[in-house]
């Protein structure tokens, strides 16, 4: 389960997520993050995230690829996001005959 705390820094909302980001909760999390991001380009702070599953990583990678900001991303999550991006940008395998 995750929890979000919102605070204001200058002109932006900071959405600090804590806990776990798992597939079963992504629809609800996406609603919150997209609604806040539309308002003022909210920054998502992942400092207190303890666990992310594959679907959560794919979501975070897509969220960031859409031009949104992830802050304080734990190194293991950052590495996984980078790998996720690499896999999604890899050319399709072509067989050689």
Image: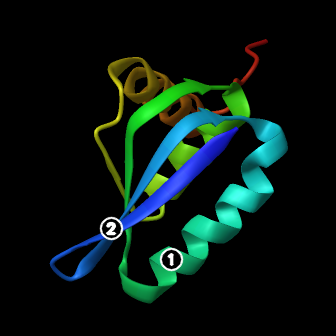
Q: Position of residue 58 (x, y in %)?
A: 63, 39
Front position in the image: 17 or 71: 17
Which residue is depicted at the point 54% across and 45% down?
60
Tag in front: 1 or 2: 2
Q: Residues within 10 Å of mark 1 (few under 14, many from 20)?
A: some
Q: Could you tell me how far apart the alpha carbons at marks 1 and 2 are, in whole angstroms?
A: 12 Å
Q: Residues within 10 Å of mark 2 (few under 14, many from 20)?
A: few
- Residue underneath mark 1: 36
Q: Is residue 35 above or below residue 61?
A: below
Q: Is residue 42 above or below residue 83?
A: below
Q: Position of residue 5 (x, y in %)?
A: 45, 58
Task: Name the image quarter holding residue 95.
Answer: top right
Which residue is depicted at the point 70% across and 24% down?
93
Q: Secondary structure at mark 2?
A: strand
Q: Which mark is residue 22?
A: none
- Residue underneath mark 2: 7
Does residue 30 appear left or right of residue 77 in this picture?
right
The C terminus lies in which quarter of the figure?
A: top right
Of marks 1 and 2, which one's residue comes earlier in the chain? 2
Does residue 48 appear left or right of residue 93 in this picture?
left
Which residue is depicted at the point 78% across and 38% down?
23
Does residue 92 appear left or right of residue 11 in this picture?
right
Q: Position of residue 30 (x, y in %)?
A: 67, 61
Does residue 45 appear left or right of residue 83 in this picture?
left
Q: Is residue 24 above or below residue 32?
A: above
Which residue is depicted at the point 74% across and 50% down?
26
Name the residue at the bottom extreme: 39
Q: Secondary structure at mark 1?
A: helix
């Amino acid at each position: 389960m995750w929890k979000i705390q919102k605070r204001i820094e200058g002109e932006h909302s900071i959405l600090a997520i804590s806990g776990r980001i798992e597939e079963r909760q992504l629809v609800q999390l996406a609603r919150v993050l997209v609604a806040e991001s539309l308002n003022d380009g909210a920054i998502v702070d992942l400092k207190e995230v303890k666990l992310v599953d594959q679907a959560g990583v794919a979501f975070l990678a897509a969220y960031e690829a859409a031009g949104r900001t992830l802050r304080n991303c734990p190194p293991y999550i950052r590495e996984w996001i980078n790998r996720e991006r690499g896999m999604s940008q890899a050319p399709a395998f072509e067989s050689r005959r």
